[in-house]
Structure formats: C-alpha cells, structure tokens
Image (cartoon, rainbow, N blue to C red):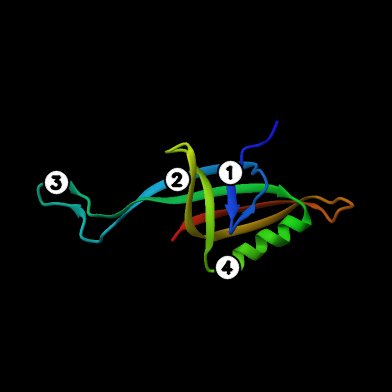
Amino acid sequence: MAFFQYLNFDGVDIPLPDSYEVEMSDKEADSGGETEAGTVQRDVVRAGVVNISVSFSVTQKWLRLLTGYKQQEKIRVKFFDPETVSQKQTEMYVDGFKAKLKKDTSYKGLWVVSFTLREL
C-alpha cells in the first residue's frame, strides 16, 4: 500500500510525518476590536493563513536536508489541505526547528525533527 504524500518542498517529496497538524487563522488589522457598544468588530486583512506543525523520525541524511530548508528564507510548499481535502501550494518558511537524537544506530542515529511551517 502506498502512502499519501503530505508534504513537498521545492519539488522534493518529504518523508511521511509522525504528526501533521494544519492550523488556519485570520490576520486582523489593528483597527479591529471591541466597540463602545460592546460588540466585536473584526477587520480581517487576510483569511485562512496556514501554519503546519510537523514532526518526523528520520536518518542523518534527511536531518541534513531538513536543516537546509530551515536556512532558506522561503520554500515553495505543496501540502495536504484538510479544508479542501486536496493538495494546495503556497510559500512558507520554517520556524521553531528542533532536532533530537532518538536512538543511536549504525546509520548515525535516528532523529526526531519537528518544526512549524508558516505561510508568508
């Protein structure tokens, strides 16, 4: 059975993640807030901004590749969008990169890598 492809960075298929969480939020202008009448006024500048939290169990080879993506200013990301249940493409950057050695092996270790992709 073939696995579904959740992430693709700049045309490179990324391994199946251990966890994959998509959060969509709205960016609001500073002019919004509570009015004198007590109602909330939202001035949405941009709706549906995507943040994706992921974690992977990877070898040293993928650790090196994922660390390289962390260094880039932006990445063209194709991801599985649960809202439309289809693939979507956008530009994102890596935030909060963490790498932890899970197990030492003869292949230079099994690493747990986690980070958040934030839409530009």
- What is the distance, in whole Å, between disc 2 and disc 4 at their CAs? 22 Å
Quadrant where the image shows the C terminus = bottom left
- What is the distance, in whole Å, between disc 1 and disc 4 at their CAs? 20 Å
User: In this view of the protein, which residue sits in the foreground, 98 or 107?
Assistant: 107
Q: Which mark is residue 38?
A: 3
Q: Which mark is residue 107?
A: none
Q: Amino acid at mark 3?
A: Gly
Q: Position of residue 105 (x, y in %)?
A: 86, 50
Q: Is 73 situated left or right of 33 in this image?
A: right
- Quick one: label 1, few (<14), some, or many (20+) residues within 10 Å? some
N-terminal of the pair, mark 3 or mark 2, is 2
Residue at position x 60%, y 68% from top? 71
Q: Amino acid at mark 4?
A: Gln
Residue 108 sits above or below residue 82 on the image: below
Residue under label 4, please give it: 72
Residues at marks 4 and 3 touching, judged by CB atoms closer than 8 Å:
no
Residue at position x 66%, y 62% from top? 67
N-terminal of the pair, mark 1 or mark 3, is 1
Residue under label 1, please give it: 6
Q: Is 104 situated left or right of 43 in this image?
A: right
**Image depth: mark 1 or mark 2 in front:** 1
> Disc 3 on helix, strand or loop?
loop
Q: Position of residue 70 (x, y in %)?
A: 60, 64
Q: Amino acid at mark 1?
A: Tyr
> Disc 1 on helix, strand or loop?
loop
**Image depth: mark 1 or mark 3 in front:** 1
Q: Amino acid at mark 2?
A: Glu
Q: Position of residue 18 (x, y in %)?
A: 65, 42
N-terminal of the pair, mark 1 or mark 4, is 1
Quadrant where the image shows the N terminus = top right
**Image depth: mark 3 or mark 2 in front:** 2
N-terminal of the pair, mark 1 or mark 2, is 1
